[in-house]
Amino acid sequence: MTLKTATPFDLDQKETKSMEDMLGALNGQGDFQNGDLIEAVVSQTDEREVYLDAGGKTEGSCPISEFPEPPVAGTRVTVVIVSRGGDQAPRFSRKLAEQRKAWEDIREAFNSKARLSGKILKGVDHGFIVSVGGLDLFMPMSLSGLRPNKGLAVGQEVEFKILEIKEKNHSAIVSHRAILEEKNEALWADLVTKCAEGDVITGKVVRRVSYGLFVDIHGVEGLVHQSDVSYKKNVSLRDRFPIGSELQVKILKMDREHNRLSLGVKQLTEDPWEWARRELKAGEQIEGTIMNVTGYGAFLEIKEGLEGLIHVSDLTWSGKRENPSKLVEPGKKVTARVLSVDFDNKRISLGLKQLEEDPFEALTRDLKVGDTADGVITSITKFGAFVRIRDGVDGLIRFSDYSHDEPVDKKMLSKEQKVTFKVLELDRKRRKITCGLKQLTPGPYEVLKKKYKKGEVLECTVKTIAPFGIFVDFGEKQEGLVHISRIPLPEGKKLEDQFKPGDKVKAALLRIDSDEKRISLSIQDYERKNERDLMNQYMKKEDAPSTSSLGSYMKHLNLK
């Protein structure tokens, strides 16, 4: 048997083959199939691709977009073979490799009940999408925290536990709440050994919400509800409780089962209404600060959480419904008198004007009906003018009391005008004073009453004939009325038959009524008076006839 001597070329070929086999064995690459997970080395990069050497003369590329930043040459990366064969160079995927590795980690964490962490990718209906190695996992809102949707934000790294996996689409349901509950259980165990309900303790303000404050007590967040912040309503949490500030609170309730720690701030001080029961009495003077001014009055803070109302009618004695904002302003310190305290309904009535003597009562001690006084017109209304008699007391001068003239000149008085008037009425119950100007001088009817006496015969001229009588002019501005009952009419005759406008008649004055502005006359009384006068004249004569011939004498004079 002849042995063939190996040539240097043969040795080189064997050595080369041996080295390739060794490298293939070392790299574990061998013959690659689509879907295999392999390691490769970065050989170079360009704007779109990362070129990888997988060994065994296997070179391919992977999209550069699958890397957070372009890798440098020589970097070892794990990839999945996406396509191989034909004339095309192999295509690799780093993203698929990460997802495969992440899924293995998820399955292992699920089986071992271990913790994982991921980044909140986005919020969706009823929860969040959490990304782990390129896989999207679902975190329901109810499992996002001890209080749903509190403290989590997109882009935040968050720890969680796997509650359920879905092999088919490589997804899972995760819970951040489970992590918090484990931590919280340990914190609660520590808290109950250190604190008890009723304890006063110092914590740190960690959050402000619309309904109160969250305060950290030994790692457990407790709630100071808005209603437990202060006895005062609508306290500004932002101004009084900065985030991170220390705050002394009282533990109101510890509910470990439901993870609720109730705290209070106002409970550190006495209820102001208890103070009021003990200290506040009607009639006393108190000091406070105007907190709010409304159209119906002003609220005065006596103590924090204890306010009283100064009604607009109790701000001033003026009697006018003035705008409260013109009399008091928020922030002003004032003294007021306690008018009443309603403990059942928690209402306190206060007054400012009650600190001074009622000017109306003081005035009525000095001023009487019929007195004359001076004042200044303060306003003109649709029914008259108001005159300032003293500070806080006005009287009313009605248009009808301006002047005796008819019609009255309503523009006779003006604002700020000084006037002298007479007091006509003082109504203490209704706190009203009625004044008059025309009462300072006698009226035309009063003048007539002094000028003419009752029964006096007046020469008159018929002006108007009415169904009930005739109006006559007797030489004055005012007309008189002769009522039909005071006119002797022949039977079957009417006033129109007996009188015409312009006729001259004589009538006796019956009455001048200045209140009713009426002058009553009587033709009948005049004729009777005239008969008596004639009779008296006849009876005085020496040759007077007998009474039996008196009738014929009167007939002779055509008086009957």
Image (cartoon, helix red, strand yellow):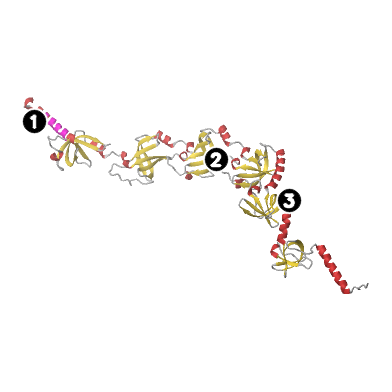
Q: Main secondary structure of the magenta part?
A: helix
Closer to us: 498 or 351: 498
What is the count of numbered marks?
Answer: 3
Dot in front, 2 or 3: 3
Give the mark nearer the N terminus: 2 vs 1: 2
User: Which image quadrant is residue 38 in?
Assistant: bottom right
Q: Residue at x 69, y 67 (%)?
A: 48
- Mark sitting on residue 301: 2
Q: CA distance from mark 2 to mark 1?
A: 97 Å
Quarter of the figure with the C terminus: top left
Q: Residue at x 74, y 51 (%)?
A: 108
Q: Is residue 554 left or right of residue 64?
A: left
Q: Is residue 23 left or right of residue 349?
A: right
Can residue 43 be seen in this snapshot?
A: no
Q: Residues within 10 Å of mark 1 (few under 14, many from 20)?
A: some
Q: Which residue is mark 3?
A: 109
Can residue 512 be seen in this snapshot?
A: yes
Magenta extent: 523-535
The local secondary structure at tag 1 comes to helix
Instruction: Look at the picture and state if 554 lies above or below 105.
Output: above
The local secondary structure at tag 3 comes to helix
Q: CA distance from mark 2 to mark 3?
A: 61 Å
Given the image, on which type of amino acid does mark 2 rest?
Answer: Glu
Residue that sits furthest to the right in the current view: 1
Q: Which residue is mark 1?
A: 554
Instruction: Look at the picture and state if 534 lies above or below 397.
Output: above
Q: CA distance from mark 1 to mark 3?
A: 148 Å
Closer to us: 544 or 413: 413
Give the percent coordinates (x, y) of residue 427.
38, 35
Closer to us: 82 or 477: 82
